[in-house]
Structure formats: C-alpha cells, structure tokens
Amino acid sequence: MNFKYSIVAAAAVLGGAVAPGTASAYTKCTITAECLIEIRMAKNEINRNIDDFDRNTTRAIDTARSDIIDALGRQTSSLSGQQSKAVETQNRHAEDVAIAREKIAIEKSSPQLQCNVASGSKGPRSGGVDATAYAGAGGAKSGRSNVPDQLKTAWNRADPASAVPAPPDPQITRVDVGAGSCAGFAGDPSSARGMMCSQINGLKINSSPFFDADIKAETLFDGPQKPGAARTQLTVTAKDKTAERDARNAALFQLSAPLPPPGISKQAVSTDAGVAYVGELTAYQAQVSLASKPARDYDALTTSNAQTKDALQVLLRDPTTAGFVTTRLDESFKNWKSEGVSAVELLDLEVEKRVGNEDWFKFYAGATDVEKAAEIPLILAAQQRMIFQLLQEVRKANVIAGQQLALQLQQTSLPKLEALAQAANGKPAQVGAQAQ
C-alpha cells in the first residue's frame, strides 16, 4: 500500500514540475540569445525534476520493499512460532507416551513392587497362637538342655509339665537351685555369687560362657551376653542343648517361680488335707503361669522361627534391600539361613531396610512417579519404627508387671501351701493362722 501511494506522489510532483515550465518556455522562446538561455534553464529544471523523481521513486521502492520484508518477517516468525509450538507439543506427547509405557510396564510387574509388603505376611506374627510355641514344646525343658543335673532337677520340680514332685522339705529344692546355678552359671569369680560358689566344698563349677545369665535381665531382653561383648540380640537360637538356649531357659526359670511350694507324700495325697493341698496348688500354678506369661511370650517372640525363612527370601529378592538385609542378618544372627529369625527381628528388618538403608534412599531419589507412589505407604515405616520401639517397651513393662504379680502370689498363696503341706505330712503347722 505504501509503495502505491509513493509512486503516485512522485508522478504528481514530476508532472507539476515539468508541464508548466515547458509551456512557459514554449511561449517565450524565439531564435535569440534570450531563447537559448530559457531553453537551458528549462532543460536544467527538467533534469532536476527527473532527479527528484528518481530519488522519490527509489525511496518509495525501498520503503515498499522494507514493508514487504517486515510483513514477510512477521509472517515467517508466526509460522516459526507455530512450528516450534508444534514440535514442543510433539515432544511432550512423546514423553507422555514414554511415561505411559513405563507405567504399563511397572503395573505389569506390580507383584515385585509388593514384595516388601508380602514379606511381612509370610512370617509369624508378633503374638497369637504361636507366641509361646517354643516355651510349651517338647515337655520339660530339662531334657532339652545341658545344664548341671541338680539344676535340671530343680527345673523339673518347678515345671508343671514335668511329673517330678517337689520334696516335702523346701530346703532340698533350695539346695538344688543354689548348687545347680553355681555349677552352671557362676563363672565370674569377681561377682558376689561367684565368690560364694567358689567356696562351696566339693562343688565343681563348669560355667556357661554367659556368666550369670540366669540372673541377668539382659538375657531375656537383649539376648545372652558374654563378658565384655554386650550387644542387643533380637534372635536367640531355638536349638536345644546350646549355650545360648540354656542361658535363656535358665533366665526364664528364675522368672517363673523357681522355688515351688513343698510337695506331699503319696500317702498324704489321699487325706483331706492332701486333697486340699492339690486344690491350692492348682490355683497357685495357674496364677504363676499367668504371671510368667509375658516373659515366656517375650522369649518366643525373640527366638528363631523357621516360619520366617520364606519372608526372608522375599526380602532378599528385592535388589534395593537385599544387600542391607544380608549384611544385617550376618551380623545379628549367623544361623538365619537354617533357622530363620525371630518375629521381632523380622519386623525390625521390615522397618530398617528402608529408614536405615542408604541404598533405599538412593533408589527413592531417582525413582519414577509410579515407583514413588508405590513406596508411599512404605515410607510410613519411619513411624512404625517408633511404634515398634514403644511396643518393645510395653512388653518389658508387662514382664515386670508379671513379676510383681508373682511376688504378691508368694506372699499370699505360699504360706497356705506350706501350712497345708505340714498338716498333710503330720507335722504341726507353724503358720496355722495364715492357713485358716
């Protein structure tokens, strides 16, 4: 449009400049010197007008060309922008397709993502019907141990599953417990008990490497401890006649009324007092069983269980946690491949394989959105760690509460049993008032 207007303007200027001058020169011109001058002046005027026309035309052409180039540039820029947007959209679409394919692939392999969850469901639970499975298996514990004979005898007398009755004289039981414990666990001569045991004439001390394990709370809560090598052991072997299992059983014996009430003779059982004694003993054993149950449960929950082996294999198939789990098990319980681990240790692995595993954090940092979404419920394992620790403390408190109940029983039931035993055996009752 500008080009058209510029050409018209240039023509108008040229026409206005040439036509009047030419007419004037024509009317005035004669064959004289004056005429020649007019001719030259008209010629110069014409040349100037031509030059002006050329300049105006050139400017008009340049302006029009610039306008055309600008218009083409804007149109090209718009096309380029549209092309760029189209390429960007295509790239985003390609990325979306790639992500969708990846999601489909991950969803197809979803059972692998669920292995972390499945591992916990394949092992024994913390509690339930199998909580005291080991404690009640195989009859009397004495037959499954290598403790001294006198200590085995004391265990049998205190064990309701054993058919060995307690002697009428409670002093005999006390001697068996004292001598058997000295021979089996008083290996530390620097302790008070160790010093006294070493002074017993004729007593040979063949102590367990776990000195004083039968009287240490750590034997139950942290596992049997060797001198100078204290550590928390969440799994204690279930294998019979091993030092670790004997130490744990000895601790359980001391926490489960190790000094039973005095027994009565076979003849005395048929008497009225003998029958009454059996009735009182029945109630007493039931109450002792209740008082010792937290300790027995804690033992079962921290004892190796073959049912955990399938769950461990699930954990080991997870490439993110396999290395951590293997290292952890080799350090905590070397026989895990053959015996499995305890229910408590399995739960600990479920928590620590994430919040305590550096490889898991690296995996999560580079994981896709789908993988992160699959891990979100499992990130709550950090909270489970606190719940787990709280649960352990509650279990310990239960054990202590059970022992408090046992002490109360000794103050209430034992005097009655002692009086009845003396009456059944034909001895004068020294605590007759309490037996009424």
Image (cartoon, grey):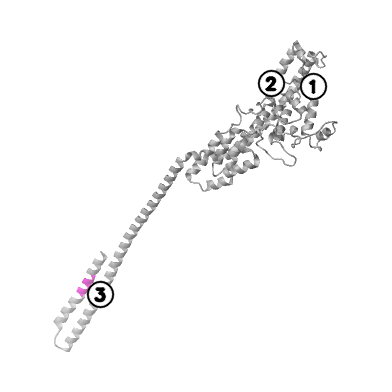
Q: Earlier in the sequence, mark 3 or mark 2?
A: 3
Which amino acid type is shown beneath numbered disc 3? Answer: Asp
Q: Is residue 57 left or right of residue 30?
A: right
Q: Secondary structure at mark 3?
A: helix
The residue beneath circle 1 is 170
Spatial separation of the CA atoms under disc 3 and disc 2: 127 Å
Spatial separation of the CA atoms under disc 3 and disc 1: 140 Å
Q: Earlier in the sequence, mark 1 or mark 2?
A: 1
Where is residue 203? Give x, y as percent: 82, 31
What span is colored magenta in the figure? 9-16
Q: Residue at the location (67% across, 31% down)?
A: 299
Q: Are marks 1 and 2 in contact (CB under 8 Å)?
A: no
Spatial separation of the CA atoms under disc 1 and disc 2: 20 Å
Q: Is residue 238 left or right of residue 198?
A: left
The residue beneath circle 3 is 54
Q: Which mark is residue 286?
A: 2
Q: Are marks 3 and 2 in contact (CB under 8 Å)?
A: no
Which amino acid type is shown beneath numbered disc 2? Answer: Ala
Against 56, residue 271 (above or below) is: above
Of 101 and 72, the residue lying toward us: 101
Q: Secondary structure at mark 2?
A: helix
Of 343 and 96, the residue lying toward us: 343
Q: Using the rendered view, name the quadrant where residue 280 is placed.
A: top right
